[in-house]
Amino acid sequence: MNTSDTLDKDRPPSGPDTTEGLDPTGPVNDLEKQNPETAPNPNLVGWDEPESEDTSNPKDWSTSQKWIHVGILSSVTFLTPLASSMFAPGVPQVMNDFRATSNLLSTSVVSVFVLGFAFGPPVLAPLSEMYGRIPIYNTCNQTFLVFTILSAEAKNMGMLVAVKFLTGVFGVAVIACGSGPIADMMSPEQRGGAMAVWAVGPILGPVIGPVAGGFLVIAKGWRWVFWVISILSGIIAIIAALFLRETYAPVLLERKAKKLRKETGNPDLQSNLTSELTGKQLFAHSIIRPTKMVVRSPIISLMCVYTAVTYGLLYILFTTFTFVFEDAGVGTIIGLLFVGIFSDRALKKVIAIEKATRPENRLVLHIIVPAALSIPVGLFTYGWSTDKHVHWIVPEIGTAVVGFGMISLVMCIRTFCATAANAVLRSLLGALLPLCGLNMYDVIGLGCGNSLLAFVALALAPVPWFFRFYGERIRTNLK
């Protein structure tokens, strides 16, 4: 099972740095003579001992350096959803300029960006494991900039849809792989707060985008939305290229081993995290692994379905009214603070008592219980208050409650179960469900439509509760 809390356990332990002062031609030491079967391999390169003094180990970076990295990653993730939601107010202008009339096309020109999110992770995630996080981030940041510029220069609707899809594919890199550097740098009891900061970007993007885009479209036209995104992404891409450092341990230790091979003349030195697979095998394994995890693990599959459905419900709401963006955003920001504070605090108490941590500890009951119930309650409130034309403050409260519940659950599940398959399913439903959202509301109304969504959310509410209590038993029985 691949979780951010168990990431370090999945890696081979780093032994002492046996390369310092190594004489490749010297005699074996006394330990090897006494018990050659249990002697450490002197050719395996790990972190220096004590590890707390090895500044090349991301876990031993200074606190400020770690949080600077998290802040930059959050800034990059802010741009991608901003680019999608900021463009939404300009759709009528685009349809008029390109003389298009299809309602399906007007919705898909926005959702195709999110659809690109589903196709990026299966390729970008394994590439980041082969070559490291930074090459993938920098390449995707630059490519995102290029396709954003092409969006501004689109000559017809077909070109705009195609380019926006590719922009989504490359823009999802940090969203898909951003939890990896957090696990690389942060101890388990710090990851909840770091994940909350990292997730601020994807939350603020949909909140700020429609408002800023509305003013910009009126003042300058829809093309200037992409020009502003291009300017911002160019600035952030430069900052990322200058200040982000590699965090992936296998890549860092392989660089260390390469350097030591050159310095010592010992060709047998290698990282203690080196995979026996070839590059082609590793890439294929990394692509297949998320699918196998979903198919073979009921925990992974149900959690992925749950987060995917919640994302789909949120994007259906985004198709109704502009204020949904604003008020759901208020609720999600509150939810981020809620999870960031209480998740790490609860995990520290568990570690103090049990002297260890389990993935299920991230499913904190006083977070997942109110969060899971908040979604159907908020949907019922929003749907029927708008259907019956109740005072505007009531549906606003409803959307805020929905946003609070969704982000709280998504954050807990991400730290519990971070897989590329999760991002794929989430993006697919986020892109495809809104295509039928407006038609559903037209047929059965806002009250019944949102009640239907609320019953779906209510049916799925027991999923995280169940795995909080029985997840460890299921995991151990599957091994």
Image: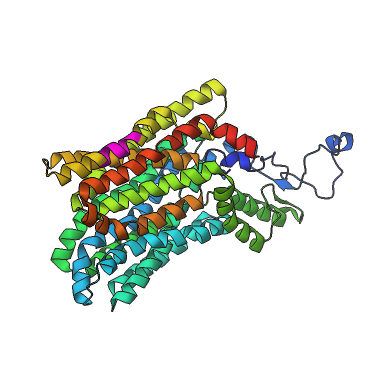
On screen, residue 377 versus residue 463, left or right, reads left
Residue 297 appears in the rendering: yes
Residue furthest to the front: 444
Kindly indicate the quadrant of the structure image that contains residue 345.
top left
Residue drawn at (36%, 38%), measured in percent from left and top? 458
Reply above or below: 59 against 204.
Answer: above
Q: How far across and down, in percent of the image, does residue 268 sit?
A: 77, 54
Q: Quadrant of the N terminus?
A: top right
Q: Quadrant of the C terminus?
A: top right
Percent across and percent down for residue 117 are 41, 59
- In the depicted view, which residue is nearer to us: 448 or 143? 448
Q: Position of residue 433 (x, y in %)?
A: 34, 56
159 versus 212 height, above or below: below
Rendering coords of residue 256 (x, y %): 64, 51
Q: Residue at x 51, y 46 (%)?
A: 301
Q: Nearer the viewer, residue 11 or 98?
A: 98
Determine the residue positioned at 36% across, 55% down.
430
Asked whether residue 30 is drawn in magenta, I would say: no
Residue 55, above or below 77: above
Asked if residue 378 is among those painted magenta in the image, a careful observer would answer yes
> Main SS of the magenta segment?
helix
| In this rendering, position of residue 303 left or right of residue 395 | right
* Magenta residues, start to end: 373-379
Write down the quadrant of residue 278 in the picture: bottom right
Residue in the image at 37% along x and 53% along y: 77
Q: Nearer the viewer, residue 35 or 23?
A: 35
Say above or below: 181 vs 235. above
Q: Looking at this view, name the residue that lies furthest to the top.
A: 353
Q: Is residue 189 among what the camera can see?
A: no
**Colour scheme of the picture:** rainbow
Q: Residue lying farthest right?
A: 33
